Image (spheres, rainbow, N blue to C red):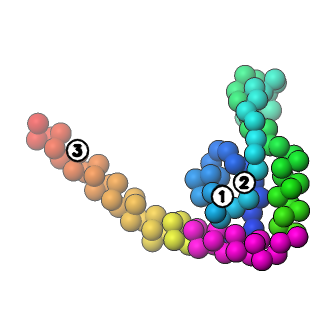
Amino acid sequence: SCAKPVIATGYSGNVDFMNQENSFLVRYRLVEIERDHGPYKKGWMWADPDVDHAAECMRRVFEDRTLASEVGERGRAYVAARLHPNTIAEVVKSRLAALDANLAAASRA
């Protein structure tokens, strides 16, 4: 939301709001976790980032400041449009109305 170019692994929750147009997504491969790491348990899958690709993204941001600014601005605009409290409130309001309608229909049945 600060119009800064963001570099992150192209996997998991951050891709709910990051994409190829508004971020620099780092390639990854899924690997099985060999031992527990905090809340992450042995046997679960982990997105192991491609370190060379991450470095390439960092170089690109450093060397092409115009592109970095453009991508950062697209990220800011995306977050402002889709994650603004008023936008989220409308989504929640709509969902609650749908749930209420379903509950009313079920109680009539």
Give the Cα distance between marks 1 and 2. Answer: 6 Å
Label 3 sits on a secondary structure element that is helix
Q: Looking at the image, which residue is at 10% across and 41% down?
A: 108
Closer mark to the observer between disc 3 and disc 2: 2
Q: Looking at the image, which residue is at 64% across and 68% down?
A: 75
Give the Cα distance between marks 3 and 1. Answer: 40 Å
Residue type, label 3: Leu
The residue labelled by disc 1 is 20
The image shows residue 89 at horizontal and vertical percentages of 42, 65
Q: Which mark is residue 103?
A: 3
Closer mark to the observer between disc 3 and disc 1: 1
Label 2 sits on a secondary structure element that is strand
Label 1 sits on a secondary structure element that is loop
Residue type, label 1: Gln
Q: Are marks 3 and 1 in contact (CB under 8 Å)?
A: no
Q: Which mark is residue 25?
A: 2
Q: Are marks 1 and 2 in contact (CB under 8 Å)?
A: yes
Magenta residues, start to end: 63-79
Q: Is residue 45 above or below residue 106?
A: above
- Residue 34 visible to the viewer: yes
Label 3: few (<14), some (14–19) or many (≥20) C-alpha neighbours in 10 Å: few
Residue type, label 2: Leu
Left or right of 103? Residue 50 is right
Q: Which mark is residue 73?
A: none
